[in-house]
Amino acid sequence: MCEQIAKVRRKLQRIGVGHILFLDETLKREGDVDSYSIFLPGQPPLIESSSTSRYAARYDMIACCSGKAVLPPVIYAPKERQRGIDTAMLLSHIRDLLAQAAGALDEYPLLLMLDRASIHHEDKILQEFHDWGCQELTEVIKMPPAAAKRLSPLDNSLFNLWRQRVLADGALTKSNIKQRMSDAWNSITSAELCAQYRNCGLLRHQDVYFDCPDPATHKHAS
């Protein structure tokens, strides 16, 4: 695993974080609230929520970023999807928003990193970007199995940061959830993106084995 991750990191470090896109899916549910809150003296220690069930309405988001900027997300309400995001929905987002937004980054070449979800078909995704005007994207790569936690800024802290901001103003309701999800994603700054790319070992000259779980046994040669 460490050698597979190191190989990917070396490749990405050579091309620079502005050229590396990460794409993934996440979700929030109607009624979600922060896990803890601070109340002033005299305030009732309660938060109003429209739903607290794990079966509450689910809103799915496709998010994509480079090491310098977030790209426009798409958010699907329950009536807009079936059991979850599928390949057709992902390709539709590329056609409607993502290809144009990636091209507007004015970076060449671009490389897109994906986890190993079944909806992520490298050839179809690359072709969709090209068909809709983003020739800058030259390669789509899937991460090694079980490597997303160590390689993906999204899987590490960006989605955690996003979740905190989504819930910062109280419980999510049917009327505010889409806007809150979108605003929270778009509020992520270039400094925050760069910091998370650094945490994943993607910046030039970083040790590609820095997070090895057992360096004494593995004895990697840098």
Image (cartoon, rainbow, N blue to C red):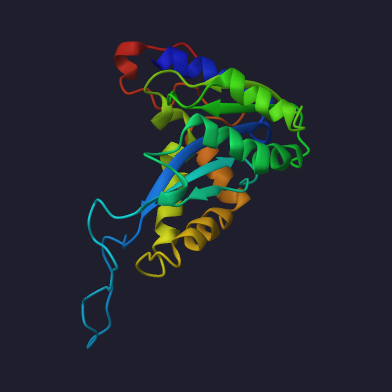
Determine the residue positioned at 39% across, 31% down: 149
Q: In the image, residue 65 lies at what x, y percent?
A: 59, 41
Determine the residue positioned at 38% across, 15% down: 1
Q: In the image, residue 68 lies at what x, y percent?
A: 65, 43
**Residue 64 occupies quadrant:** top right
Determine the residue positioned at 69% across, 36% down: 99
Furthest-bottom residue in view?
42
Which one is nearer the viewer's eye here, 171 or 35? 171
Residue 7 seen from this side: yes
- Total number of numbered labels? 0
Task: Specify whether 136 is left or right of 98.
Answer: right
Which one is nearer the viewer's eye here, 176 or 40? 176
Q: In the image, residue 71 lies at what x, y percent?
A: 63, 45
**Residue 124 occupies quadrant:** top right
Residue 205 seen from this side: no
Q: Is residue 71 above or below residue 36?
A: above
Q: In the image, residue 98 lies at what x, y percent?
A: 65, 40
Q: Is residue 148 above or below residue 216?
A: below
Which one is nearer the viewer's eye here, 159 or 50? 50
Task: Specify whether 126 is left or right of 44.
Answer: right
Which one is nearer the viewer's eye here, 63 or 176? 176
Determine the residue positioned at 21% across, 77% down: 45
**Residue 168 occupies quadrant:** bottom left
